[in-house]
Image: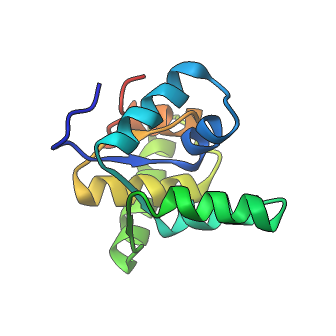
Amino acid sequence: MLSMDRSVLVDTSALIEFLNDGHQAVADEVERALAAHITTCDAVVMELTAGAQSESELRSITSLLAMGHNEAVTSVDFEIAATLYRTARRSGVTVRSMLDCVIAAVAVRLGIPVLHHDRDFDALASCTEVRVHPV
């Protein structure tokens, strides 16, 4: 459970579960995170807004994202992401999405865990410094 002084980077996958009343434990944890403090990043914003199927849905997503802090992706994040990907491959771990590596890199740079519902983050956490928020 989150405390008020703890931040977490919330991935697209967790926000989708929250918006769609999906996986209950993940949706509940996103709700707790929203009451405390969440961080997203440019990549999460892009993924969520790209998936909006109407202007009304886009407004809802934009309002949800405005409840937290958006961290800009930097060139350092791309370097970290490449290192995470290479480390995972050397460890025999397959990461399906390079964009997940970028999101994970932002969390690593900020020193916060990722709240997610996507196996790529568990894979990265198994062999890199990526930390995942328990659900």
Left/right of residue 27 with respect to residue 115 in the rendered view: right
| Image location of residue 78, percent across then percent down | 43, 70
| Residue 53 visible in the snapshot | yes
Residue 44: quadrant of the picture: bottom right
Residue 84, compared with residue 35, is above or below; it is below
Image: 81 above or below 18: below
Farthest residue toward the left?
Answer: 5
Q: Which quadrant is home to the C terminus?
A: top left
| Horizontal arrangement in the rendering, residue 44 relative to residue 22 (left or right) | left
Return the x and y of residue 80 as percentages of the image width and height: 36, 63
Q: Can residue 83 be seen in this view?
A: no
Residue 133 versus residue 94: which sits nearer the camera?
133
Where does the image place residue 30, in percent across and percent down from the top left? 46, 36
Residue at 49% from the left image edge and 33% from the top image edge: 123
**Residue in the image at 20% along x and 42% along y:** 6
Q: Is residue 30 rendered to the left or right of residue 33?
A: right
In the image shown, does 71 or 87 lie closer to the viewer?
A: 71
- The picture quadrant where one finds residue 128 is top left
Q: Position of residue 28 (x, y in %)?
A: 48, 26
Which of these two is toward me, 26 or 105? Answer: 26
